[in-house]
């Protein structure tokens, strides 16, 4: 961690000020990619409180609260809707389960891939987009150099701290350019960029 912090301090005075202002983020240990993808889909576009309730009811549907993909893939939409999952999200959850059964969604499979390979692999699943996989890379797989340029929290903080005036594609290109000196520790830089707005994604 010290090596990464020293690099970021030297690379960017804006990030250096954030490092001085905010507490050091906790290191992320490796978690279950399959479970985290399910939770990410159930959490989309709803409040944290509502998501927590739905996830708890969803987990209660399985023995030992273990959402076995073979069991999930044969559940009906009505069964999933009964715990608060929308019909669209029910389909996405079963897509994830089917993908896990066919391709595997464990560390042995994903750790052998580069970041971009993981993104290409998992965005084959309908309902799983690039941002979701980037969060998985950062918080589940513990990859050190991920920069989720489409994250609204990162965008808003960088617009303010770097006084950016671009929008859309030009904004994203400017952000990518600013992030280059942070390599190979862009994940850590992003953890600090989320802090001013207290906007760290729930994962």
Image: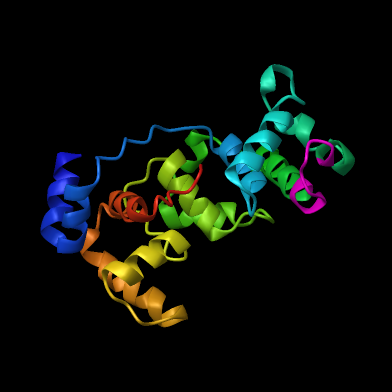
Question: Quick check: 172 above or below 151?
Answer: below
Seen in the image, is 113 located left or right of residue 6? right
Q: How many marks?
A: 0
Q: Quadrant of residue 78?
A: top right
- Quadrant of the image containing the N terminus: top left
Let me know if residue 138 appears in the view. Answer: yes
For image coordinates 29% across by 49% down, the residue present is 188
2 on left or right of 121: left
Instruction: Find residue 98 and report its horizontal and vertical position in percent.
Output: 73, 42
> Vertical placement of 196 versus 28: above or below?
below
Q: As rendered, which of 119 and 56 lies closer to the eye?
A: 56
Task: Indicate left or right for 161 with 45 as reference.
Answer: left
- Residue 172: x percent and y percent? 40, 74
Q: Quadrant of residue 184?
A: bottom left
Q: Quarter-wise, where is residue 193 in the image?
A: bottom left
Name the foreground residue: 83 vs 137.
83
Image point (12%, 48%), residue name: 6
Q: What's the coloring here?
A: rainbow
Is residue 119 on the magenta stretch? Answer: no
Res 151 visible: no
**Residue drawn at point x = 37 percent, y = 36 percent:** 28
Return the residue nearer the eye: 188 or 18: 18
Q: Residue 8: percent from the left, percent from the top?
A: 18, 54
Q: Residue at x 78, y 41 (%)?
A: 84
Magenta span? 81-90
Residue at the far top in the pictured view: 64
As drawn, 2 above or below 7 = above
How far across and how far down the image is residue 194, in percent? 37, 53
């Amino acid at each position: 961690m010290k090596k990464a912090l020293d690099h970021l301090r030297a690379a960017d005075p804006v990030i250096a000020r954030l490092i001085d202002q905010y507490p050091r983020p906790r290191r992320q240990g490796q978690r279950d990619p399959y479970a985290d993808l399910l939770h990410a889909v159930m959490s989309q576009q709803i409040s944290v409180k509502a998501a927590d309730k739905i996830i708890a009811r969803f987990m209660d549907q399985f023995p030992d609260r273990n959402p076995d993909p073979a069991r999930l893939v044969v559940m009906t939409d009505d069964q999933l809707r009964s715990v608060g999952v929308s019909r669209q999200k029910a389909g996405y959850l079963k897509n994830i389960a089917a993908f896990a059964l066919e391709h595997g969604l464990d560390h042995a499979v994903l750790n052998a891939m580069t970041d971009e390979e993981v993104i290409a692999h998992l965005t084959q699943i309908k309902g799983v987009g690039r941002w979701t996989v980037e969060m998985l890379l950062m918080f589940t797989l513990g990859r050190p150099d991920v920069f989720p340029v489409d994250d609204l929290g990162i965008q808003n903080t960088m617009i303010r701290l770097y006084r950016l005036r671009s929008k859309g594609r030009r904004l994203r290109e400017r952000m990518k350019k600013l992030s280059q000196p942070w390599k190979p520790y862009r994940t850590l830089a992003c953890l600090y960029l989320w802090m001013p707005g207290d906007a760290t994604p729930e994962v």
